[in-house]
Amino acid sequence: MPSISEVLDSMDYGPAPESADHALKWLERGPFGHFINGAFTAPDALFTTDNPATGAPLAQVSQGSAADIDAAVAAARAAFGDWSARPGHERARYLYAMARHIQKRERLFAVLEVLDNGKPIREARDIDIPLAVRHFYHHAGWAELVVEEFPNHRPHGVCGQIIPWNFPLLMLAWKIAPALAAGNTVVLKPAEYTPLTALLFAEICTEIGLPPGVVNIVTGDGTTGAALVAHEGVDKIAFTGSTAVGREIRRATAGTGKALTLELGGKSPFIVFADADLDAAVEGVVDAIWFNQGEVCCAGSRILVAEAVAPRFEALLRARMGRLRAGDPLDKGTDIGAIVHPRQLERITGLVDQAQAQGATVHAGTAPQGCFCPPMLLTDVAPANIAVTEEIFGPVAVMMTFRTPPEALELANNTRYGLAASVWTENIGTAMDVAANLRAGVVWINATNLFDANAPFGGMRESGFGREGGRAGMLAYLAAPGPQGRAPLADSPAPVPLPAGGGAGGGIDRTTKLFIGGAFKRADAGQSWSVHGAGGDVIGQAPWGSRKDIRNAVEAAAKATGWGRATGHERAQVLYFLAENMDRRRAEMTEALVQAGSPDPAAEVDCSIRRAFLHAAWADKLDGRVHATRSAHVTLAMNVPHGVMGVICPDAPALLGFVSLVLPAIAMGNRVVVVPSQTQPLPALDFGQLLVSSDVPGGVVNIVSGPRAALTRVLAAHDGVDALCCVAPPEVCAMAEAEAAGNLKPVWTESAQRDWFGPAGQEAVFREFAVQVKTVWTPYGA
């Protein structure tokens, strides 16, 4: 044992182990069954969960079967009616009790989490458990307020929730708390590697007297999760995990009507400008990539450093990395614990080996033998290096340099992910400018990995869609008003290309064209089809759009970036001018709708003009929020446009349906590629003339007519389309959702009849889908 003077001289850590006795005693209750309908089932089809730090078995847990999922969903369905009908105050009391009971057993939860997951006790004790408690307290408040704050909304019903192994209890809290606050019931599947704190939480549900069936927990592997996703009795799926599995879930839920939120992988940039506090930024890297062994979806794994300070920053970072302690997770002096499973360790080392073979230089700290990985920094990496492009999910960072802010942004956004980003600079102008242009759902300024129950969290692009936390997180567990119980939209016959010599006779021949990039263009296929009026007469020909026309339209929309940067007031002025020009051409539009067979042409034109005024009014009023989170921070939740949106319009009303979907999208700053009515596309194609005369910039609205199913498939699958709104028959909507899994774009579909002339035609859902929440954490008053 060293003397006090020797310790003060060396400043070495001594051992400070946390006892695991009480957690091991609790584990003696095993083997464990599932928690269904308020009670534990008899253990069956057991598998072992191990301590990753030692390899020793911890407990035996049941492998969930399709029959177990059936039983859990049936219990949740039976409980839903009573639970959702209870006053919010009653649900709040249960959520409050959950928070209090976790607090009363926080040491047991923390140690059990460490044994099962391998994370350091300091992180479980000081971060995971308190934040889980915070979520239950926060959502107890939402349960009190849900009726007042979300009028006309209703709970989805039975929610299937699948959580990962990196933050087992915290992810449980993120999922269960808002679901119960909104009035839903839950079937939760914890990760195969880390089910134990979920089973301990099930005991709390019993202790507080939670009604049977409100929370059900079924353990097992991926087949159990797949059975939950596929179950017809589930109304919503919430998944946190890998992008690959998220993509399969998107395809599996396509056309089922299940609501879906996905929080997936990331490859987050950590940007250090030359004027940054380098010592603080180095500590930021420790929190960004070496926290939780790097097993964090939003880990700042791509370090981008200004070239002028890169050598000094690298030296500081490598020195700090060399002082990190990897080892026993139960030791309070440990910085980096065990990797959750040997399979994950094998994946990490395999990717590092590939990166090294591609030219990377590997700098590594130290770690003991076993399921441990030393902290690593990879330099000399090209943008295409596998360590730069792929999510490693371990304590491995790559470092690259940049010279200018535009180059930093180009490197930062050069990824298929978009979960989070961290910006380090002493210049507030630089910080906010970069934050605004980063394609990420969460941006931290001079900080990293800050979380709070009142701060929306979620990604863009292949990092998923939907938000957890705060008001936006509550909305994910509530169904908006919609055309409930209405008849489904019927499919119309697909158009047939016009044969040679076909078409309408008499008068000067009229050639209708596609509208792309602010100009009228001939269809690439060189074909048209005949459009028939109400009496069956041919009233004109529509251009036959194809895959290439969609490609050209998406390219034109992608170039019109100035529209999204314009102020809401500037966009409003354009839309007001559009309404003015529509009014001037009222008679012409009415006559076109008479020919198209509109039941009430004058009313359709009048309502379309009023919609233009409505969305002009909203252009500068769909405000974000400032959330109350941590002290010394302002947490901004900004409503930002998706970028390029695809819009599939209903067959009728041909003009009003087009206007009601397109105008809210562009009012919020998006650019759109629109497939108009398949039966009556001419009013929408003629609308291009109004767009040109109303100062709508080229590329903001692009109109491609043609066979609806084929064009929808191309739009849904296109990687350049960031979101899709589809009002079409059920089979087209299902196909759109499945094809959108390619780049995991959010899709809003509706396949039921809607009264486009009434309030249903201008509901908030059209504006709300046109934006996504971007959360920006800024220092304030520190």
Image (cartoon, rainbow, N blue to C red):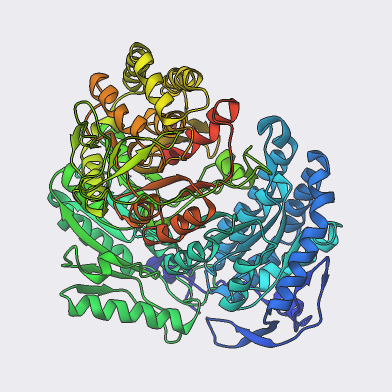
Residue drawn at the location 59% of the way across and 54% of the way down:
257
Q: Residue 779: tell me if it is visible.
A: no
Q: Who is closer to the viewer here, 193 or 293? A: 193
Residue drawn at the location 23% of the way across and 61% of the way down:
399
Residue 292 vs residue 56: left or right? left
**Residue 305 x/y as whole percent:** 21, 52
Residue drawn at the location 34% of the way across and 11% of the way down:
584
Q: Who is closer to the viewer here, 532 or 569? A: 532
Q: Who is closer to the viewer here, 525 or 367? A: 525
Residue 1 vs residue 720: left or right? right
Instruction: Name the image quarter holding residue 285.
Output: bottom left
Residue 471 vs residue 521: left or right? right
Residue 31 vs residue 686: left or right? right
Instruction: Name the image quarter holding residue 513.
Output: top left
Residue drawn at the location 34% of the way across and 18% of the way down:
588
**Quadrant of image for the C terminus:** top left
**Residue 645 x/y as whole percent:** 36, 43
**Residue 538 x/y as whole percent:** 35, 36
Against 699, residue 26 (above or below) is: below
Q: Residue 487: tell me if it is visible.
A: yes
Against 70, residue 622 (above or below) is: above
Instruction: Name the image quarter holding residue 501.
Output: top left
**Residue 731 x/y as whole percent:** 51, 57
Against 729, residue 622 (above or below) is: above
